[in-house]
Image (cartoon, grey):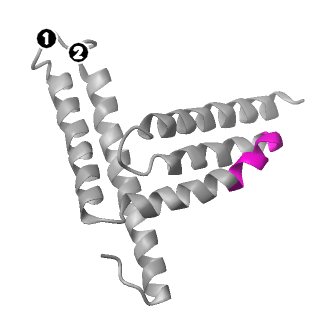
Amino acid sequence: MAAGKQVKRATIAVVGAVVLLVGVALLVLPGPGLLLVLAGLVILASEFPALERHVDPVRDRAMKAAEDSVSSPLRVAGSVVVGLGLVAAGIIWGLRVFPWLPFPGWSTGSSLILSGIVLFALLGWSYRKVSERERGSGRRLD
């Protein structure tokens, strides 16, 4: 295997693994973290065909989770509150407001802020997808 192909394969493996791990971390939040798990699997399957068999089952579950995450105003509000909490926690960590917090500083703070932004992006994507499907079927998203 040529060095360029090895670098490409390693880069895809690292990017896919990072996206997959961020998705797994977001599974504990009320937002659509399974979408990132799916994205990570799709990235990895592009270079590692053995993973392809996991993509369709995860895609089905991810689409169901995306629909569920915006199925009620309470769930959307919960996701927004968690996202705002992540951003606020990131600012608190970054500014070292409480010096007793573990790993104070912007390295931890920025990762918390980024997690909140990812949550908002995935929530918006889920809402848009479900709304488009609801409009196409003639049903309303309430």
Please indicate whether residue 69 sits to the left or right of residue 83 in the image: right
What amino acid type should be assigned to the residue bearing mark 1? Pro
Task: Work out whether mark 1 precedes mark 2 in sequence or the reverse, and give the earlier one.
Answer: 1
Residue that label 1 marks: 99
Instruction: Assign the magenta stretch its main secondary structure.
Output: helix
Q: Quadrant of the N terminus?
A: top right
Residue positioned 36% across, 57% down in the render: 123
51 w.r.t. 136: above or below = above
Residue 91: x percent and y percent?
A: 17, 31
Q: Vertically, is 130 above or below 44?
A: below
Q: Secondary structure at mark 2?
A: loop
The magenta stretch spans which residues?
A: 48-56
Q: Residues within 10 Å of mark 1 (few under 14, many from 20)?
A: few
Above/below status of 138 relative to 43? below
Is residue 88 rendered to the left or right of residue 76? Answer: left
Q: 20 above or below 34?
A: above
**Mark 1 touches mark 2? (CB < 8 Å):** yes
Pick whichever, 125 or 110, lies toward us.
Answer: 125
Residue 52 on the magenta segment: yes
Query: Closer to the camera, 6 or 20?
Result: 20
Residue 78 tag number? none
Q: Position of residue 82 (x, y in %)?
A: 25, 43
Q: Amino acid at mark 2?
A: Pro
User: For mark 2, what is the residue?
Assistant: 104
Residue 94 placed where, x, y %? Answer: 20, 24
